[in-house]
Image: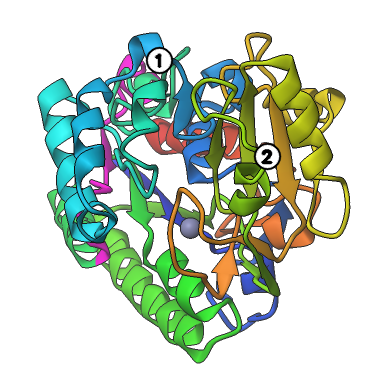
Amino acid sequence: MPSRLAIAMFIDACGWDVVSARPWWLKQLEHRQSARSVFGFSSACIPAILTGRSPSSNDHWSSFRYSPSTSPFSALRVLDLLPPSVADRGRVRRWVSKAIASAYGFTGYFQIYNVPFSALPLFDYAEKKDLFRPGGINAGTSLIDELVERKIPYHCSNWRKSERANLASLGEAVEEGTSRFAFLYTAGLDALMHEHSRNSDHVDARLHWYESQLQGVLDAARRKYDDVQVAVFSDHGMATVTRVVDLMPRVERLGLRFGKDYAAIFDSTMVRFWFLSPRAEELIRNALVDGKDGNWVREEKLKAYGTYWPDHRFGDAIYALEPGVLLSPSHMGRSPMAGMHGYRPEDPDSDSALLASFVPETPVSEIRDYYGLMIEMATWAQAG
Ligand SMILES: [Zn+2]
């Protein structure tokens, strides 16, 4: 009986600017195009890809939302007494993240990053569940739920594991030969480009490695199956950092009280504010102006991006930095980086890349169309 396998390979941050500059890469995949990303980070892009829906529809955008009454972090107030030399240490923060995740049974990608221990009790965390498991989406269903519903046998990487481990487990699934759809998750390129930017030789080396690994998987799959389809895509691109700004002092010097007058999350490319007093709003809006560093994102824009919630759960106002301008220090990290993403989706650096071994019937113009594309692939494989 003929059998088919469809493989979707996700490469974090492998944007159109990375791929279009390297036409030699995976050139056997002849369908090559860009797709517009989502305003936000991977925490917004991956759910959009897995659901085919915008952040406001699947209720996944940034990691932290202002919600003191539901915050899982209230016990952390005591840790604020730790000297900064201990409290700011990455190892301590990773350990605390793990301890909270296990205490609450969170299975999602859970990180307290660099948010001060004193501020954490004001916030709740959006990604508590594993996105790649059935029922992993905050609102509505995902590709994974659909595969289960349609009884399509599938293999999905474990994002907690290394790329090598995920490639090895895909290899095992191929040898077993029962899966019809496979989702391969890789995130190493993202880390590499944060450190070295997208133009580095390290990026070429990693892309060569992905190519040879994927070729190995495809060779094995073609021995086992009659027909194999593959699509390679990313969630967003990577902009080169041209300037670093520190916005925290500009807000701190206003003399407002964090948690009383306002709350804020300083992401690496945007600041999200909750105004707890009218005076705070006025002062903060005057302190951060539209200009060469960034702009206040208008409500109509947020609606167009699919990142508007009537209850402002992810912020009363968002100040977005210009592409290439990096906020550092931020609540995401303390050291500046060579590459960053999470800028407005109109910026060409934000575009995702799609490379496929076939011409998709699903029209793809933005990353949430990858959902329909993967459904198309799984349907094709199941029919074979
Ligand atoms: Zn990244």
User: Which one is nearer the viewer's eye here, 61 or 248?
Assistant: 248
Res. 380 in view: yes
What residue is rendered at 15% in x and 24% in y?
105
**Membership of 279 in magenta stretch:** no
Measure the C-alpha gap from mark 2 to mark 1.
Answer: 23 Å
**Membership of 148 in magenta stretch:** yes
**Location of residue 176 in the rendering, given as x and y in whole percent from the top left corner:** 13, 49
| Sequence-wise first label, 2 or 1 | 1
Relative to 244, 260 lies left or right: left
Q: Answer above or below: position of 242 versus 313.
A: below
User: Which one is nearer the viewer's eye here, 252 or 22?
Assistant: 252
The total of numbered circles placed on residues is 2
Q: Answer above or below: position of 332 versus 164.
A: above
Relative to 127, 62 lies left or right: right
User: Which one is nearer the viewer's eye here, 278 or 315?
Assistant: 278
Residue type at the position of mark 2: Leu
* Residue picked out by circle 2: 254
Residue type at the position of mark 1: Pro
**Location of residue 201 in the rendering, given as x and y in whole percent from the top left corner:** 51, 90
**Location of residue 182 in the rendering, given as x and y in whole percent from the top left corner:** 33, 45
Q: Quadrant of the C terminus?
A: top left
Relative to 349, 58 lies left or right: left
**Location of residue 328 in the rendering, given as x and y in whole percent from the top left corner:** 55, 61
Category of crowding for the residue at label 2, using alpha-carbon neighbours closer than 10 angstroms: few (below 14), some (14–19), many (at least 20): few
Q: Which residues are magenta?
A: 146-163
Label for residue 68? 1
Q: Quadrant of the N terminus?
A: top left
What residue is rendered at 53% in x and 74% in y?
26
Query: Which numbered disc, 2 or 1, marks the residue closer to the eye?
Result: 2
